[in-house]
Image (spheres, helix red, strand yellow):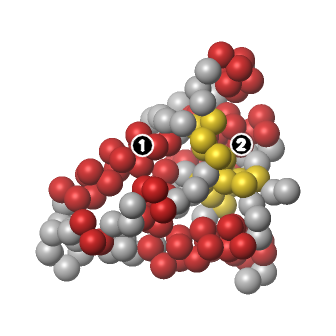
Amino acid sequence: MYEVILDACVWVDILVGKRPRHEKACRLYRELRERQYVIKGPMTLYFEIISALRHEREKPCVEGTPMYKSDVRGIDEIEFLALPIDEKFVEKYASLDLPRIRGDSIYLAMAKVDQLDFITEDARNLKVATEFGVRAFKIDEFFIRWQV
């Protein structure tokens, strides 16, 4: 069984049809599910995704038209193993001297401790993760790794 962590920006790309990387992110999600990957994330990922979706709804899309509810898939349409932020979680992941990158250090801690691949489209997160010793990829790089 393979496990992987997706950055919140990838989840938003999956959920929002008008984002430029939507098709690529959906393909990644389908491939991960077909290959029976377990996609892990902290329970707080739900809140991060919801916050990002609210932000997306408030800004006009590339064509200058507002985003409609039909442009966004429901959060209930995605599946990931949501890990509760409890004492066990904190003991396991909080002992690292983590780099400071907004709220995303939780993803780096999980990827580092569990030796998981981390997929992001955020250039800064990619750079910091790589420097931190995490196997980090953009979506296209992950496809190359699979040779698809």
Q: Which residue lies under the disc numbered 2? A: 111
Q: Mark 1 or mark 2, which has the lower sequence index? A: 1
Tag 1 secondary structure: helix
Q: Residue furthest left?
A: 65
Q: Residue at x 42, y 43 (%)?
A: 48
Q: Quadrant of residue 2?
A: bottom right
**Residue type pointed to by label 2:** Ala
**Residue type pointed to by label 1:** Glu
Give the answer, above or below, for where 20 lies relative to 11: below
Tag 2 secondary structure: helix
Q: Residue at x 68, y 67 (%)?
A: 33
In the rendered view, does 58 fall on the left or right side of 123? left
Instruction: Please state the horizontal and vertical placement of residue 37, each as a whole percent of the image.
Output: 74, 60
Q: Residue furthest bottom?
A: 148
Quarter of the figure with the N terminus: bottom right
Instruction: Please state the horizontal and vertical placement of residue 102, each as a whole percent of the image.
Output: 45, 35
Q: Which mark is residue 48?
A: 1
Q: Residue at x 69, y 67 (%)?
A: 32
